[in-house]
């Protein structure tokens, strides 16, 4: 019986610790939000992570992605400029068809 009381005491201490840290309130709020969702998400765990702010890339990963995005935007700009130049050169040799003209 003494062992049962010791484990109850530990449980109670842990519950107080979670309550003091705001964990119970946060979990309750997130679970209530999930319950109140009209369109339940396919992945409840992802919903919980997102609402708790756990989801998302690490700062290092985010920085790498930003860098890659910048590089790809520059490459896209260069390719669009090259495409424009090639279209202009093509028009020199092959005029655009007129409206209503049969090909």
Image (cartoon, rainbow, N blue to C red):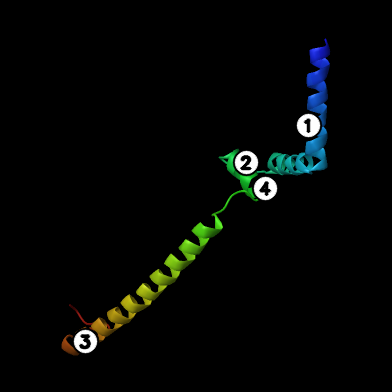
Numbered disc in front, either 4 or 3: 4
- At x 33%, y 78%, the residue is 78
Q: Earlier in the sequence, mark 1 or mark 3?
A: 1
Q: Earlier in the sequence, mark 4 or mark 3?
A: 4
Tell me the CA gap for discs 2 and 3. Answer: 55 Å
Q: Quadrant of residue 2?
A: top right
- Residue 50 picture location, percent across and down: 62, 49
Which is more N-terminal, label 2 or label 1?
Answer: 1
Residue closest to the eye, 74 or 92: 74
- Image x and y of residue 7, in percent: 78, 20
Closest to the observer, 26 or 36:
26
Q: Residues within 10 Å of mark 1 (few under 14, many from 20)?
A: few
Instruction: Name the mark nearer the viewer: 1 or 4.
Output: 1
Q: Find residue 40 and name its label.
A: 2
> Which residue: 46% across, 62% down?
64
Q: Which residue is mark 3?
A: 89
Q: Secondary structure at mark 1?
A: helix
């Amino acid at each position: 019986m003494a062992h049962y009381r010791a484990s109850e005491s530990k449980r109670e201490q842990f519950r107080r610790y979670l309550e003091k840290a705001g964990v119970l309130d946060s979990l309750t709020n997130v679970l209530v939000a999930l319950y109140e969702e009209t369109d339940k998400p396919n992945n409840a765990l992802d919903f919980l992570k997102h609402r708790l702010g756990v989801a998302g890339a690490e700062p290092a990963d985010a920085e790498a992605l930003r860098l890659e995005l910048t590089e790809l935007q520059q490459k896209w700009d260069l390719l669009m400029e090259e495409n424009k130049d090639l279209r202009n050169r093509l028009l020199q040799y092959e005029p655009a068809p007129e409206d209503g003209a049969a090909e």
